[in-house]
Image (cartoon, helix red, strand yellow):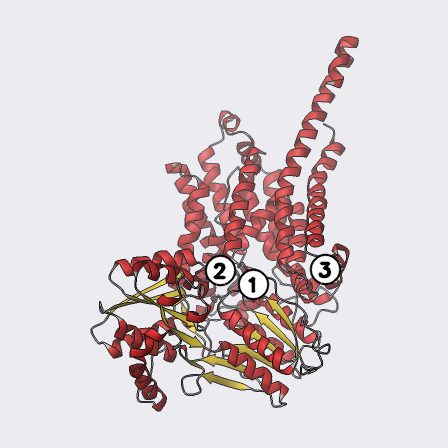
């Protein structure tokens, strides 16, 4: 039994590590907590929206949170009810399918799935419930009449912040930190590197990923982000683009300590980051997941649900860069010039590094 | 100690642990403003649905392999934390082989399973060899090998190496296994739709359980294994080669670990992709502890964990945080260990009393004091 106690200690430690990998998210507000019918001024809709998050769920300060913002906006504007469910670590596709089926059985329509991991499950369940409208963010593998694929041209937005990084860099050395080494994040890297090169062909690039799949902890590991960024700054980099979700906050801290620049991701992190580090966030590559989710719900409210693949890119303002930090001002002219070239098709941004 | 008491005590520990953890969970629920009765009601209500029952059984099949893999090591006092890396590497390579070859139906499945078993055994064997020849603790080496497996799989799972991209998707996967290499599901649970079936691998799980029981309790090898686990010096004295036993049990443990990914691979996804379930090896450790390394106990533990895991959606939809399930699972594992220790002490005390009583009976009144001691 002494052995068993040893094992238990190791297990407990393991559980802590795993818990760290998960998230410190606050539990999802269930069942459309605010009752729209109580407040007379609020608009009401009998629509019940089901939202299935990826691991981390609401409160991950990143991708899932962006989707949650879109949902919240739809709740406020249309008075829709919502049920939010989130994926668990180590679950199978079958469990994701069950989540979607539970929502469909519960009368939730439309149903929005967040993240490419839902690709297979959404394809399967959408076929089983042809009367329910589904949407999936970050995936376009299925082609079904009741499914909207909401995808982003992350490479285009990243290209622009790459241009800004190269222009702002005094050392001619810029860095990219990806959360997890998956094709989706490689798209950010491809765009960023191409943008930096387009601005300064002799620029030095450093690319690092925090974790390898199936360890998705790299999206939520500020300490790792900080150490990795510090390594880059020590090697002469003076601008680092953090496409690493919640790990970005560590990168910002390292930037602060090094007196260098960092670039945020997904939302305008100059506005959302801790006040102590916000001034080092030169700009952020914006990926409007919230707009995509909101637009989809709106299309259902309006009675003409989106279907097929909708790409959110520079042309329709689905991706871009933020200008809330005044320090980015000197570099916007160049970035906008490149943006025009991308929109006109003069420049094609690569999707793989 | 008589046989009946032994059985009662053996069952008392897990039962005690589950009751205790239910109590703790109820407390957490009350503190967070939920009604424990309602929550348990919701969980049972969800488990009454055929679709969810199928999912529970399917989760349990996977967990069963993981837990038996860990249990084989435990019997030898070896702590194979590396089941996680072993099954991921095994599933990935087996998926790649399965997608690359063309074979008749049964042979195709057999080849995939054999590849998985061999890869799992080989990966665990590294830790076994390190332990035998260099004295490296298997706890350390298997944790390290988990990390190495992660990087190895990440390297192999690249377009152009062993994987391919899916048009329009951000996922990458090995070439899908054709129908000849797939294991059809079974409609074991009435009322479950045709799209949700029990994994055909359930037969292999039963087979592994029987083989595990037979190996441990009906063979010389199993006796040597348990003897070495119980007392290494005694085993050496009776002529058992400890080195051989360490290596053999690591290889068996790894071979079973190789099967962990098979239900999912052969019965559901037919490919190894970025979102292939990870972390099952750690669940296996908890279930092996809960099931006391016994083939039947593990089956119950696997079903219990399957039930808890699949109840989380039902909980979430009724407004309870699904993390409550994780708390319950964590408390179960901790209290199981404590309960075993408590029960062991009770058993020892009871045995001492027995001896005392016998002595008292033998020595007449002189031994009476010992009875109360």
Residue at label 2?
A: B91
Q: Nearer the viewer, residue A35 or B198?
A: A35
Q: Are marks 2 and 1 in contact (CB under 8 Å)?
A: yes
Residue at label 1?
A: B264
Query: Foreground mark, 2 or 3?
Result: 3
Residues under labels 2 and 3: Cα distance?
Answer: 32 Å
In this rendering, would A13 be left or right of A28?
left
Mark 2: few/some/many CA within 10 Å (<14, 14-19, 20+): many
Query: Foreground mark, 1 or 3?
Result: 3
Q: Earlier in the sequence, mark 1 or mark 3?
A: 3
SS assignment at label 3: helix
Q: How many marks?
A: 3
Q: Is residue B10 above or below residue A60?
A: above
User: Residue sitting at 60 percent across and 46 percent down?
Assistant: B288
Q: Earlier in the sequence, mark 2 or mark 3?
A: 3
Residue at label 3?
A: B43
Q: Are marks 1 and 3 on the same chain?
A: yes
- Residue A191 visible in rendering: no
Q: Nearer the viewer, residue B98 or A324?
A: A324
Q: Is residue B351 above or below residue B97?
A: above
């Amino acid at each position: 039994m002494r052995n068993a106690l040893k094992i238990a200690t190791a297990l407990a430690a393991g559980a802590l590590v795993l818990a760290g990998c998960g998230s410190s998210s606050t539990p999802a507000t269930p069942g459309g907590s605010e009752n729209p019918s109580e407040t007379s001024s609020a608009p009401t809709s009998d629509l019940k929206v089901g939202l299935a998050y990826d691991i981390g769920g609401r409160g991950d300060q990143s991708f899932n949170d962006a989707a949650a913002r879109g949902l919240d906006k739809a709740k406020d504007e249309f008075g829709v009810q919502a049920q939010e469910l989130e994926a668990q670590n180590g679950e199978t596709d079958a469990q994701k399918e069950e989540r979607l089926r539970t929502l469909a059985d519960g009368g939730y329509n439309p149903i929005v799935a967040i993240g490419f991991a839902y690709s297979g499950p959404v394809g399967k369940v959408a076929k089983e419930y042809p009367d329910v409208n589904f949407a999936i963010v970050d995936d376009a593998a299925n082609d079904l009449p009741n499914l909207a694929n909401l995808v982003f041209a992350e490479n285009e937005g990243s290209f622009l912040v790459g241009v800004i990084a190269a222009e702002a860099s005094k050392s001619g050395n810029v860095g990219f930190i990806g959360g997890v080494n998956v094709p989706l994040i490689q798209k950010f890297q491809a765009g960023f590197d191409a943008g930096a090169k387009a601005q300064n062909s002799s620029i030095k690039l450093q690319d690092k990923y925090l974790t390898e799949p199936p360890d998705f902890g790299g999206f939520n590991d500020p300490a790792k982000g900080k150490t990795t960024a510090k390594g880059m700054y020590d090697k002469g980099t003076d601008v680092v683009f953090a496409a690493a979700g919640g790990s970005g906050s560590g990168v910002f801290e390292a930037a602060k300590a090094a007196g260098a620049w960092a670039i945020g991701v997904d939302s305008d992190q100059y506005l959302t980051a801790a006040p102590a580090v916000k001034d080092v966030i030169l700009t952020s590559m914006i990926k409007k997941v919230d707009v995509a989710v909101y637009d989809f719900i709106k299309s259902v409210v309006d009675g003409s649900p989106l279907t097929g693949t909708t790409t959110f890119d520079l042309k329709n303002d689905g991706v871009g860069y933020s200008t809330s930090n005044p320090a980015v001002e000197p570099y916007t002219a160049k970035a906008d010039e490149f943006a025009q070239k991308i929109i006109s098709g003069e420049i094609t941004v690569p999707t793989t590094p | 100690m008589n046989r009946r008491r032994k059985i009662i005590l053996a069952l008392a520990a897990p039962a005690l642990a589950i009751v205790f953890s239910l109590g703790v969970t109820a407390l957490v629920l009350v503190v967070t403003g939920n009604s424990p009765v309602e929550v348990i009601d919701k969980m049972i209500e969800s488990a009454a649905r055929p679709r969810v029952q199928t999912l529970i059984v399917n989760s349990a099949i996977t967990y069963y392999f993981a837990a038996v893999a860990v249990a084989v090591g435990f019997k030898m006092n070896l702590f194979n934390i590396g089941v996680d890396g072993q099954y991921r590497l095994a599933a990935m390579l087996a998926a790649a082989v399965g997608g690359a070859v063309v074979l008749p139906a049964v042979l195709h499945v057999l080849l995939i399973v054999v590849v998985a078993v061999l890869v799992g055994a080989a990966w665990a064997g590294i830790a076994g060899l390190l332990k035998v020849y260099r004295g490296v603790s298997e706890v350390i080496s298997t944790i390290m090998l988990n990390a190495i497996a992660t990087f190895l799989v990440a390297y192999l799972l690249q377009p152009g190496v062993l994987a391919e991209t899916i048009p329009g998707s951000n996922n990458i996967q090995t070439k899908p296994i054709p129908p000849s290499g797939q294991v059809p599901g079974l409609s074991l649970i009435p009322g479950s739709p045709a799209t949700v079936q029990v994994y055909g691998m359930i037969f292999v799980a039963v087979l592994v359980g029987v083989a595990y029981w037979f190996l441990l309790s009906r063979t010389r090898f199993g006796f040597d294994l348990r003897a070495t686990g119980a007392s290494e010096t005694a085993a050496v004295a009776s002529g058992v080669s400890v080195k051989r036993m360490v290596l053999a049990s690591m290889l068996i443990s790894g071979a079973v670990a190789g099967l962990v990914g098979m239900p999912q691979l052969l019965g559901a996804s037919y490919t190894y992709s970025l979102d292939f379930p990870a972390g099952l090896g750690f669940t296996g450790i908890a279930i092996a502890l809960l099931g006391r390394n016994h083939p039947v106990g593990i089956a119950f533990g696997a079903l219990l964990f399957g039930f808890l895991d699949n109840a989380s959606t039902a909980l979430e939809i009724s407004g309870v945080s699904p993390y409550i399930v994780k708390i319950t699972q964590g408390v179960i594992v901790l209290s199981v260990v404590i309960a075993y220790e408590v029960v062991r002490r009770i058993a020892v005390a009871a045995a001492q009393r027995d001896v005392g009583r016998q002595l008292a009976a033998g020595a007449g009144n002189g031994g009476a004091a010992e009875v109360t001691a």
